[in-house]
């Protein structure tokens, strides 16, 4: 049974190679697996549906290029929904690169709905200071936000003038890849000012959000690329996330196969002893 | 004396911010906000210290021809190039934007995607049913992995619901337990720091 | 007659009062909603007979916080409900004035928790000061620290200490700096090189100070090399690739990952595993714990990270604070059990007390 001993000491690169194949092949030959909708994603969608026209939604891009692949599809799908419902989008970011990444989606989607910068949407850019800044921001936007992303005075935009404190905001959507992020929005914004918070997080962070979902501190959750794929399905705009689902399915299956093989090796080792 | 002044600052400001959390009077809120703004200012200043450190360490490496010193030249070149692109064209400028979109984003995503490979090798090595608890963990992990992706739904329609149950009941209970303990530990450490019992974080020794 | 009844039925009932638990800077308005109307216009005046100025127009809301008021001055309000074809106004309500509250009563629950924990900790610190021996359970990850440093020394290889990717406003980073002090003492004593790459410049400054002081404390100031404690980059994955580079090139025999980590945890730990290092990790974030548990030799779970420095110091006063923390935990567990019973029975006393969402 040298086979199992060899398998136990298998070169990691063979595993990596198989994972690579499992990612690439379904991207080239799509399987078209159906995407089911989970409760936390449906909750976000329903809340946006309920908001009356003109409501202000803060879209906080709290991520960077590292998690762009996972969170940009969620950003795009959510913005699509907001503009379709004629909500006003107030974009910002707690991470330096976040608003820049969000802006790519904003600038590509907003014109398709005929939205006007400063009236229907605005990007106030990166806001440094993390939790400390969030506390101050909720209390008084006008004190901290003097200019938009491009340095134009915020007062020169109708939407800039409309947001004075947390109480003017109807919903916060934080696209969060870590700290500062969703946890700080909950602790320093929602708990203090009662603002509703929805989130899209990386898949790694998603399990961590369930205690806040069950306590009602989060109204909904888009977990990882799967969450984004569900949202794309809900808004009927299938794009990058849905396309990635086949790969993700096959990789997960492959992981299960690895785990099973690992356990067969364990059984063999136990018997031999 | 070198430690007494920082300790007094930690004690005074720390307790003030805690008290201000409970007292909504404007004077307390304004003062608290001012301290918070100071912190933001200090953070901004440290960006320069960081850059200075990178330059100093790498110039030193090049001068003394330490191992792999050639890479330091590349690092310093790109540091200057990216800064120059930002200063000349602004953050919205063509070159800076191009470098950000076509270099930094793909490089970041590449490192992040290493996770997929490392998860596979770690799962192969570590996910073994050595004890009854590990077996339970293993079964839950397999269900979640299959049920979280469309193929799970394709295999059995009940998978996503089972996953939601695992996530919102046993997972939430465990997370709460860990968070609860961690947060109490945090408060306890905060008290040790505020009272000056714990000083090793500022280079200090015994009480 | 029917028309008059309709008007009465549609009458907007307005309530205006000082916003509770604030610094005296706002007045809360609440009115009864009516589905027949699609918007509400709020008017304000300083004189009931005077000119009412429109302050805002809202839809789908039945509360408004007027933050544009001067504390201590009298204000009068009325709300006009506007439909497609008709509009109905409320009575004028007032005078109402905003005044500051000295204590935020909605946070009394948090105050109680802090005070209870504070006294539990102080009590045990006092007992420890009097010389009473306190039993603290053994934490394998912490007891392995010395052994791990010893191994690096025997192999003649460096020790790598990664303090997480967050700044010093994160408690995990402060905890990490405290442990770094103890680790630096040991490495300096043995003369083993210690690398501390950081992702934040402020953490670098702090770490340099901590390591330098530790070397002085054990009488080895010559051992301290400032370039070994350096800043790499703020970028999460840029930092990870740089640290991975250090691991692959320098092949440290011991890796510590103590602080706040995110997606990089497994990338670091797997790279460390592939270089054959003994690895000790610790973080308070439950998301990342499974990765560390899978790829490291020892993992400090949640509170153990915060306790590590106190434990390593073996100072009675520090150990006393851990004991106090445990007693605090016991009290809170009892409160949780009572809270569950309270909710099941339907009294909701504890539930209402701990429901912290601010009014």
Image: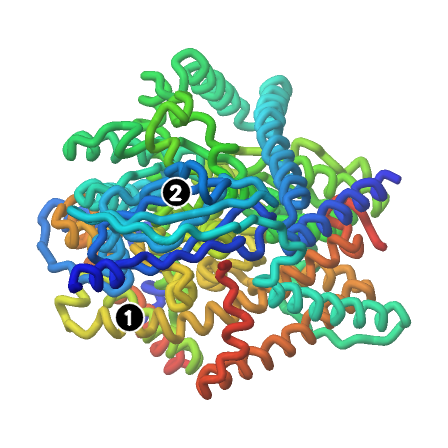
Which residue is at 46% across, 82% downward? C343
Name the quadrant containing residue B143.
bottom left
In the picture of the structure, the residue carrying the numbered disc 1 is B163
**x then y, percent, for residue B139:** 32, 75
Q: Nearer the viewer, residue B173 or B61?
A: B173
Determine whether, in the image, residue A229 is placed left or right of residue C28.
Answer: left
**View extreme (front): residue:** C1
Label 2: which secondary element:
strand
Please indicate whether residue C220 sits to the left or right of residue C230 in the image: right
In the visual, does A44 lie left or right of B182? left
Which chain is home to disc 1? B
Q: Is residue C137 above or below residue C17?
A: below
Q: For the residues tagged 2 and 1, is the chain the same?
A: no
B33 vs C128, nearest the viewer: B33
Residue C43, numbered circle: 2
- Between marks 2 and 1, how big is the CA–CA gap? 52 Å
From where the camera sits, is residue A110 visible? yes
How far across and how far down the image is residue B8, in percent?
Answer: 81, 45
Residue at 69 percent across and 59 percent down: it is B189
> Which type of secondary structure does the marked residue at label 1 adopt?
helix
**Callout 2: residue from which chain?**
C
Q: Position of residue A151 (x, y in %)?
A: 42, 21
Q: Residues within 10 Å of mark 1 (few under 14, many from 20)?
A: many
């Amino acid at each position: 049974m040298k086979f199992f001993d060899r398998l136990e000491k298998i070169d990691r690169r063979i595993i990596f190679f198989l994972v690579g194949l499992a990612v690439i092949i379904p991207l080239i030959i799509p399987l078209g697996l159906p995407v089911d909708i989970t409760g936390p994603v449906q909750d976000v969608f329903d809340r946006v549906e309920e908001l009356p026209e003109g409501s202000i939604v803060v879209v906080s891009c709290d991520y960077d290029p590292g998690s762009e692949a996972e969170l940009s599809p969620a950003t795009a799908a959510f913005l699509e929904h907001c503009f379709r419902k004629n909500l006003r989008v107030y974009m910002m970011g707690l991470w330096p690169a976040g608003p820049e990444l969000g802006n790519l989606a904003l600038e590509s989607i907003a014109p398709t709905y005929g939205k006007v910068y400063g009236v229907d949407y605005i990007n106030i850019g990166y806001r440094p200071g993390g939790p400390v800044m969030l506390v101050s921001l909720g209390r008084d936007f006008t004190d901290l936000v003097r200019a938009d992303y491009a340095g134009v005075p915020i007062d020169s935009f109708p939407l800039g003038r409309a947001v004075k404190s947390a109480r003017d905001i109807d919903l916060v959507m934080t696209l969060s890849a870590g700290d500062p992020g969703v946890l700080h929005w909950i602790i320093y914004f929602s708990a203090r000012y009662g603002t509703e918070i929805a989130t899209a997080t990386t898949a790694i962070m998603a399990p961590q959000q369930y205690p806040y979902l069950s306590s009602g501190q989060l109204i909904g959750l888009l977990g990882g690329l799967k969450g984004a794929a569900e949202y794309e399905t809900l808004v009927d705009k299938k794009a990058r996330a849905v396309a990635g689902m086949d790969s993700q399915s096959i990789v997960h299956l492959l992981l299960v196969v690895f785990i099973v093989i690992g356990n067969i090796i364990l059984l063999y080792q136990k018997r031999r002893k | 004396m070198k430690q007494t002044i920082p300790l007094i600052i930690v004690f005074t400001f720390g307790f003030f911010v805690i008290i201000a959390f409970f007292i909504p009077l404007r004077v307390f809120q304004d003062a608290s906000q001012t301290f918070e703004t100071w912190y933001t200012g200090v953070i901004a200043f440290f960006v320069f210290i960081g850059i200075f450190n990178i330059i100093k360490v790498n110039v030193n490496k090049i001068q003394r021809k330490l191992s792999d010193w050639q890479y330091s030249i590349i690092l310093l070149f790109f540091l200057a190039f990216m800064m120059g692109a930002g200063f000349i064209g602004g953050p919205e400028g063509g070159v800076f934007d191009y470098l950000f979109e076509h270099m930094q984003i793909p490089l970041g995503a590449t490192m992040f995607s290493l996770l997929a490979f490392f998860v596979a090798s770690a799962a192969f090595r570590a996910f073994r049913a050595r004890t009854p608890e590990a077996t339970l963990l293993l079964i839950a992990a397999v269900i979640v992995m299959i049920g979280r992706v469309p193929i799970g739904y394709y295999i059995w329609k009940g998978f996503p619901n089972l996953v939601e149950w695992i996530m919102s009941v046993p997972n939430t209970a465990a997370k709460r337990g860990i968070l609860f303990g961690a947060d109490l530990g945090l408060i306890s450490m905060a008290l040790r720091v505020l009272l000056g019992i714990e000083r090793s974080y500022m280079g200090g020794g015994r009480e | 007659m029917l028309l008059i009844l309709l008007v009465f039925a549609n009458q907007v009932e307005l309530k205006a009062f000082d916003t509770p638990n604030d610094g005296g800077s706002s007045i809360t308005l609440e009115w009864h909603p009516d589905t027949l109307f699609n918007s509400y216009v709020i008017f304000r005046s300083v004189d009931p007979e005077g000119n009412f100025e429109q302050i805002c127009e809202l839809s789908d809301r039945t509360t408004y916080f007027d933050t544009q008021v001067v504390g201590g001055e009298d204000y009068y309000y009325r709300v006009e409900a506007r439909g497609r074809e008709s509009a109905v106004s409320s009575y004028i309500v007032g005078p109402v004035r905003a005044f500051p509250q000295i204590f935020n009563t909605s946070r009394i629950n948090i105050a109680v928790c802090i005070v209870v924990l504070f006294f539990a900790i102080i009590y045990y610190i006092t007992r420890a000061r009097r010389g009473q021996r306190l039993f603290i359970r053994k934490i394998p990850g912490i007891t392995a620290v010395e052994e791990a440093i010893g191994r690096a020394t025997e192999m003649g290889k460096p020790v790598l200490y990664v303090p997480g990717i967050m700044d010093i406003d994160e408690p995990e980073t402060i905890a990490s700096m405290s442990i770094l002090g103890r680790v630096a003492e040991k490495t300096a004593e043995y003369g083993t090189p210690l690398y501390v790459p950081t992702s934040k410049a402020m953490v670098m400054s702090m770490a340099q100070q901590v390591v330098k002081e530790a070397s002085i404390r054990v009488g080895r100031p010559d051992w301290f090399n400032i370039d070994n404690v350096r800043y790499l980059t703020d970028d999460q994955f840029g930092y990870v690739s740089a640290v991975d580079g250090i691991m692959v090139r320098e092949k440290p025999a011991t890796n510590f990952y103590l602080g706040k980590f995110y997606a990089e945890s497994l990338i670091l730990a797997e790279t460390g595993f592939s270089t054959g290092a003994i690895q000790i990790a610790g973080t308070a974030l439950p998301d990342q714990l499974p990765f560390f548990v899978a790829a490291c030799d020892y993992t400090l779970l949640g509170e153990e990270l915060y306790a590590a420095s106190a434990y390593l110091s073996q100072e009675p006063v520090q150990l006393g604070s851990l004991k106090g923390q445990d007693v605090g935990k016991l009290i809170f567990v009892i409160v949780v059990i009572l809270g569950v019973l309270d909710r099941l029975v339907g009294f909701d006393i504890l539930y209402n007390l701990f429901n912290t969402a601010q009014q």
